[in-house]
Image (tube, rainbow, N blue to C red):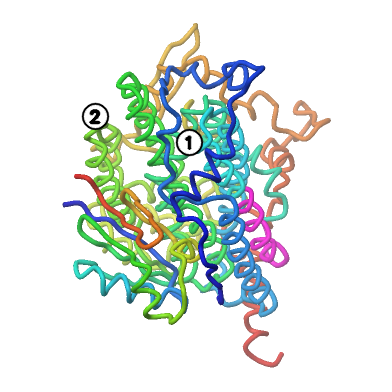
């Protein structure tokens, strides 16, 4: 980079004043409450919007300049990666399943974040947060676009990436990230900011982007590394916005504290549940591993989040109570999740497998309390069965949690041999939950969560077959019909990695890349 | 005292920045990971414009940091001359 620094006419602080609040005006012929109709119904009291300060003091002119530089770098690398058949440099073709999960599960959330921040920015009466939300909204659509562009290169060569947007709205496990974000954008603007700006961006997003993207680099995927770090360079600003929001709201009025604490408790748990997918990616899906899920949780949540909540204690904010449950789950989460996907590998748009022996040794070293005792025997059994031609595919549908929409795969806190079930009776119906925290979230807002579009319920109700399907026809195969509805091709996009088209093609092409054919 | 951190992409743009941070913050620990560098420091960490300019031989706007920034923690205070990360507790 060769960036010239022009002589400044205004200092950073003055420029920020002029380019944010200086562009705002007081309405003269419309009432403020008519212009900002969502600013008060959540119960948050704001007395002085001018107290808002963006610590980076970024203004729109500087924003465009730096974002343009990031984009130039990013697309130069993506082009070079594609031109050099960079996909053949990844450790092995199992790795590509992580980007399938990323594209179908995460990239559409970036687009929803774009919409959410545009909406929140419009809803806030203060010029400072409005400008910050505008920038974040633009960042998020950039992330969606750059991820789609970077990963489209894999779609030219591998299965399961061909219809990610269609799948996102339909496939059972993708309802977990989808419903998480739909939940956030249908909240009020302040709750959205606490949910996504603070709880997700500040407390949890490092877990998604930093170790996973560093892992992508370690596995030779320069395309993912580049979009990941380019997105993450914006995240630093988003995290700052998230922290500023919390401090600003809490400083404005003491009545705001209980509302904010409840939102932090709720959204830390909601976000953590979504990260179950990331835990599994880190421990099972990266052929070369940088750190375990447990280590990442300890560094980015326990150490860093611990410092954050200690800092916020001066406002009366406490560490979310769910942190105690999460601490008990960290030895088990990724193993239980991968075991579930291995079971349901016929209904997933990516491949699953049993880890190799040295990978199991790595897992045993990283999880000395749990892996050899609870999870290795099961994986070894599955491997023996597969070798005998009995690769296990679960054909029944799991019960889902009404709040997080994850199958009931989690165990009782402190007892990894017993599945955790909770239930609530509400208006004559029974609702099921994976945990005390998901149950409490439901109990506080049942009107919202009774509306959940639960994929398993929808399949049983007949809502997930292609139009014109007759389920009463002779020989009707429900799984085949559901996969057609998902646009998931049986035998190509799903099943075990062993014997897959991806595996065969990758070996063939890699061979061609290293010797004359 | 809690730890703050800043994580930067590992490349030629950031090499002098990381050197400047290490020189200005004796308490900082530099952790190298694939494609990135994470710098941890007890309580406080300061990035100084002048120290970076000394190393790169040209003017530097601290907002250029955004191009190669991966993540950070702590409360931020940024002026034309310094970016500081700190925890109050």
- Element type at marker 1? loop
Place residue A362 in its image quadrant.
bottom left
Q: Position of residue A16 (x, y in %)?
A: 49, 47
**Are the residues flagged by discs 2 and 1 in contact, CB closer than 8 Å?**
no
| The furthest residue to the top | A428
Mark 1 = which residue?
A: A406
Mark 2 = which residue?
A: A316
Q: Position of residue A280 (x, y in %)?
A: 43, 53
Disc number lying in front (2 or 1) = 2
Q: Is residue A52 above or below residue B44?
A: above
Q: Nearer the viewer, residue B23 or A158?
A: B23
Main structural element of the magenta stretch: helix, strand or loop?
Answer: helix
Q: Residue at image x 61%, y 40%?
A: A112
Quarter of the C terminus of chain B within the rendering: top left
Region in magenta:
A141-159
| The furthest residue to the front | A9
């Amino acid at each position: 980079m060769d960036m010239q620094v022009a002589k400044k006419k205004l200092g950073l602080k003055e420029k920020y004043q002029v380019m944010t609040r200086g562009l705002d005006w007081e309405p003269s012929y419309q009432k403020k409450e008519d212009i900002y109709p969502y600013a008060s119904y959540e119960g948050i009291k704001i007395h002085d919007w001018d107290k808002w300060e963006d610590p980076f003091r970024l203004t729109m002119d500087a924003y465009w300049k730096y974002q343009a530089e990031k984009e130039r770098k990013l697309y130069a690398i993506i082009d070079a990666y594609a031109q050099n058949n960079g996909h053949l440099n990844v450790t092995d073709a199992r790795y590509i399943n992580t980007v399938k999960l990323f594209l179908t599960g995460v990239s559409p959330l970036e687009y929803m974040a774009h919409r959410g921040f545009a909406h929140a920015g419009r809803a806030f009466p203060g010029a400072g947060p409005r400008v910050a939300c505008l920038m974040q909204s633009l960042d998020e659509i950039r992330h969606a676009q750059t991820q789609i562009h970077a990963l489209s290169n894999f779609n030219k060569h591998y299965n399961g990436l061909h219809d990610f947007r269609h799948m996102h709205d339909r496939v059972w496990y993708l309802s977990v990230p989808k419903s998480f974000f739909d939940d956030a954008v249908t909240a009020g603007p302040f709750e959205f900011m606490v949910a996504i700006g603070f709880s997700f961006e500040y407390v949890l997003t490092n877990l998604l982007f930093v170790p996973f993207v560093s892992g992508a680099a370690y596995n030779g995927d320069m395309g993912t590394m580049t979009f990941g770090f380019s997105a993450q360079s914006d995240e630093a600003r988003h995290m700052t916005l998230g922290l500023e929001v919390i401090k600003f709201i809490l400083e404005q009025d003491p009545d705001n504290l209980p509302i904010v604490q409840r939102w932090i408790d709720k959204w830390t748990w909601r976000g953590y549940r979504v990260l179950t997918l990331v835990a599994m990616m880190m421990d099972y899906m990266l052929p070369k591993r940088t750190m375990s899920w447990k280590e990442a949780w300890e560094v980015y949540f326990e150490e860093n989040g611990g410092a954050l909540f200690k800092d916020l204690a001066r406002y009366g904010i406490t560490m979310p109570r769910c942190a105690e449950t999460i601490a008990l789950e960290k030895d088990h989460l990724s193993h239980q999740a991968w075991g579930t996907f291995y079971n349901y590998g016929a209904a997933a748009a990516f491949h699953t497998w049993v880890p190799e022996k040295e990978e199991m040794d790595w897992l045993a070293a990283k999880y000395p309390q749990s892996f050899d005792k609870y999870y290795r025997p099961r994986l070894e059994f599955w491997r023996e069965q597969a070798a005998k031609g009995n690769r296990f595919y679960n054909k029944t549908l799991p019960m889902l949690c009404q709040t997080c929409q994850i199958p009931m795969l989690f165990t009782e806190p402190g007892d990894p041999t017993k599945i955790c079930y909770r239930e609530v009776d509400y208006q004559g119906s029974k609702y099921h939950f994976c945990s005390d925290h998901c149950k409490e979230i439901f109990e506080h807002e049942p009107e919202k969560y009774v509306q959940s579009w639960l994929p398993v319920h929808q399949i049983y109700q007949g809502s997930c077959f292609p139009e014109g399907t007759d389920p009463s026809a002779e020989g009707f195969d429900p799984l085949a019909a559901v996969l057609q509805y998902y646009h998931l091709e049986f035998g190509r996009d799903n099943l075990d990695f062993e014997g897959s088209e991806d595996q065969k093609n990758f070996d063939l092409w890699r061979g061609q890349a290293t010797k004359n054919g | 005292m809690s730890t703050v951190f800043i994580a930067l992409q590992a490349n030629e743009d950031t090499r002098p920045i990381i050197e400047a941070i290490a020189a200005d913050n004796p308490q900082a620990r530099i952790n190298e990971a694939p494609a990135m560098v994470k710098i941890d420091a007890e309580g406080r960490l300061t990035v100084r414009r002048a120290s970076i300019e000394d190393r790169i031989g040209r003017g530097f706007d601290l907002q250029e940091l955004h191009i190669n920034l991966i993540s950070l923690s702590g409360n931020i205070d940024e002026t034309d001359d310094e970016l500081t990360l700190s925890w109050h507790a």
